[in-house]
C-alpha cells in the first residue's frame, strides 16, 4: 500500500498542534486548574486580585502558543512551501525542494488526532502534522495506513 499527499503548515495548523501538545500534558492541565481555582477564590472572597490572576493564568498559555505558532510559521523555511509525504509499508518519506527524509514505522512514537489535524509523533516532542483540510479524501486512507503499521496502543485517532 502506498499513499502520497501534500500538506501546508500554516500558523493555524501549528497552533492546533501546540495546543494539543501543551494541554495533553500535566503542565497545561495544572495551569488551567490553577486559573479556575483562582476564579473560584474570587467568587467566594470577592477580592479582584483573584479574578485578575485567574484570567491571566488561564489566558497566558493559549496567547503565548498563538504567538509562538505565528513566529514559527514565519521563521521556519520548511513551512513556507508544501511538504510532500509518501507513506509506504516501509515507512514515511517527506520531501521538499529535492531534500528527503525517511522514517520507519517502528520509530514512530504515537499517533493522535485533533479536530483539525492528524499528528504522528516521531519522538516525544517532534511530529508530522497532517491538516485534515489538506488530506481531503485521503484522510481515511492515512488513518488506515497508520493503524495498520503501528501498534493499537499507540494510535488514538478519532475519524
Image (tube, rainbow, N blue to C red):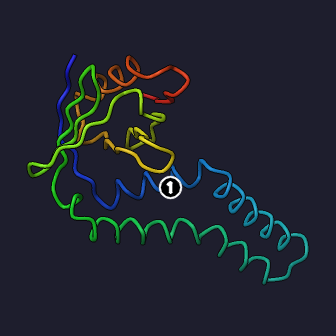
Q: Position of residue 43 (x, y in %)?
A: 84, 70
- 80 horizontally vs 55: left or right: left
Q: Residues within 10 Å of mark 1 (few under 14, many from 20)?
A: some
- Residue 27: image quadrant is bottom right
Rendering coords of residue 47 (x, y %): 85, 82
The answer to which quarter of the image holds residue 68 is bottom left
Q: Which residue is at the far left? A: 98
Residue nearer the viewer, 66 or 84: 84
- Image vertical order of residue 71 relative to residue 153, above or below: below
Q: Residue 34: x and y, percent?
A: 76, 64
- Location of the N terminus by quadrant is top left
Across and down, in percent, residue 130 comes to 31, 41
- Nearer to us in this view, 106 or 37: 106
> Which residue is painted at 38% across and 38% down in the image?
118
Total marks shown come to 1
Q: Which residue is mark 1?
A: 19
Residue 90 vs residue 105: left or right? left
Q: Residue at x 24, y 58 (%)?
A: 79
Residue at 50% over, 70% down:
63
Label 1, secondary structure: give it. helix
Q: Residue at x 30, y 27 (%)?
A: 142
Q: Quadrant of residue 129?
A: top left
The outermost residue toward the right is 45
Amino acid at each position: 500500500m502506498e499513499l502520497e499527499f501534500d500538506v501546508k503548515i500554516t500558523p493555524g495548523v501549528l497552533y492546533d498542534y501546540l495546543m494539543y501538545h501543551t494541554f495533553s500534558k500535566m503542565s497545561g492541565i495544572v495551569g488551567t486548574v490553577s486559573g479556575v481555582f483562582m476564579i473560584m477564590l474570587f467568587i467566594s472572597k470577592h477580592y479582584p486580585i483573584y479574578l485578575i490572576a485567574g484570567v491571566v493564568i488561564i489566558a497566558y498559555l493559549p496567547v503565548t502558543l498563538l504567538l509562538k505558532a505565528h513566529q514559527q510559521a514565519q521563521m521556519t523555511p520548511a513551512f513556507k512551501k508544501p511538504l510532500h509525504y509518501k507513506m509506504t509499508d516501509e515507512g514515511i518519506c517527506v520531501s521538499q525542494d529535492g531534500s528527503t527524509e525517511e522514517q520507519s514505522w517502528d520509530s514512530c512514537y504515537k499517533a493522535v488526532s485533533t479536530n483539525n489535524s492528524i499528528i504522528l509523533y516521531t519522538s516525544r516532542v517532534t511530529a508530522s502534522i497532517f491538516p485534515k483540510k489538506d488530506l481531503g479524501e485521503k484522510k481515511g486512507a492515512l488513518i488506515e495506513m497508520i493503524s495498520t503499521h503501528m501498534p493499537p496502543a499507540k494510535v488514538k485517532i478519532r475519524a
